[in-house]
Amino acid sequence: MYESLRTLNTIDFKNEFENLKADAELILSKEGHIISLNSIGKELFNDSRYFYDYFTSYYAEQALYYIRQICEKGSYSNFSLLHRFCDKESYMQYSGAIKNGYILLTGREMVTSPPSLDLNDLLSHFEHAYAIVNRTLDIEQSNEAFCQYFCEDDKNKYGNNMNIKFLSTNSEGLKVASRLVKDVLEKKTPLQLEVKNDHSGEWLNLKGIYLQEKNSVLLMIYDLSYERKYTHLLTYQDQMESVSYLSAGVAHELRNPLSVIKGFLQLSALTDSFDKYSNTILSETERMNEIIDNFLSVARKKAKKETRTPKYLLESVIDIIRSECLMQGIHFHYNVEPVEDKVEVNESSFKQIILNALRNSIEAFPEDSKKNVFTLQSFAENGSLIIKLSDNGGGIPNEVLMNLGKPFFTTKDKGTGVGIPLCKKIMEEHNGTFKIESKVDEGTIITLTFPLKKMCNI
């Protein structure tokens, strides 16, 4: 997921682009998200905002290798990639550099095809398991990571004469590898499939690419098991923390309407005129139901995204924030500007992000201070909904700020380090951004951006 306090534009890196001297100009995040394009780039990359969507599987690996080289070396020129645009396939020759954590690319369409990148050179930088398999399913070439999928008995028995069918001996999920290789050889097209085993926790992604020159298949195995377990841990841990954290807030927020109901019932009994106060009592009962729904929506596990108005989303979460700030003696300020368009969000996940920021702010405030302030601002800018969450707490030192977001990194005695990574993951799933700014003794600002959906007037 890419991070930005505001919408980037290629003009922000004008000097760097002038030095690269090419036609199409792109700004990418390190993950491959296209943040900004010039006019020529928009003509080519108009179907997706993800750079790797414009490649076949084979060239996606080359593109990934190229971006890594830019990150490691600082710049890399004269690298050719074959793109698959909506109406054509075209080679682009790229020059690239890294600046302020962003990948700057310039590319020019080539009239003639470039010489192909040496396969062995490309595979030497490939970190995952791979093997080149021929038509008889014998393994002609592989790396050490791939060999780990064979049991020791097979390796000792067959040595270098390994066959792809032996994979199933050590991993039941890899029984499909032979079938995948045969299908790629038959169709002469890249194929992939996922292998999941909930019982063992195994989760693999298999990709096969047809190598025309060798009449063989490049088989790659991506082990996603750890990623899956980590994602489940993030979600479960933060949901449990949110539910626990909100329980006190529910009791506090319900106290006000309960007090009103109790008072009017007592007044009704004294005056023997229940009908006179029944509407007020029913109104407060509805208010209690609304509060309960707002709080419970955080604990519900709903993967479905729904189109909502920013006003609806923010009003429901503002109730929660106001209640918690009252309990903690924190001054709460908010300014929500009217926004006509809507956002497509998972409401439960949205509230998790806001409440995580509030929880972190409360923990950062000095205990003896009576001037603690938490602020929520919301407005539309350049087609996005911007939400700024800020506090005037102790701030975050630079050395800590640089590590925030890394899995399980925390400075709290009882912290788990899953809150911020989960927030970033949620924002990535919503095609949004998550950015933290902080200065010691001045406070912290978290900026969230969600893409807005234009509402058509009928």
Image (cartoon, grey):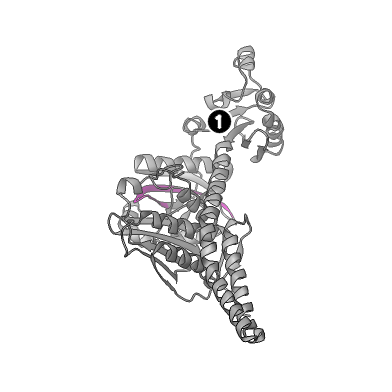
Identify the image quadrant of residue 380. bottom left
Q: Quadrant of residue 297?
A: bottom right
Residue placed under numbered mark 1 in the picture: 129
180 vs 359: above or below: above
Residue stretch rendered in magenta on the structure: 88-106
Q: Residue at x 59, y 56 (%)?
A: 299
Say what secondary structure mark 1 lies in: strand
Three-letter residue code for mark 1: Ala
Q: Is the magenta stretch mostly helix, strand or loop?
A: strand
Q: Is residue 411 above or below residue 272?
A: above
- Residues 245 and 298: in front is 245
The answer to whether residue 395 is magenta is no
Q: Which residue is at the front of the view, 350 or 74?
A: 350
Relative image position of residue 89 (x, y in whole percent): 57, 50
**Residue located at (61% from left, 61% from top):** 305
Tell me, yes or no, if residue 81 can be seen here: yes
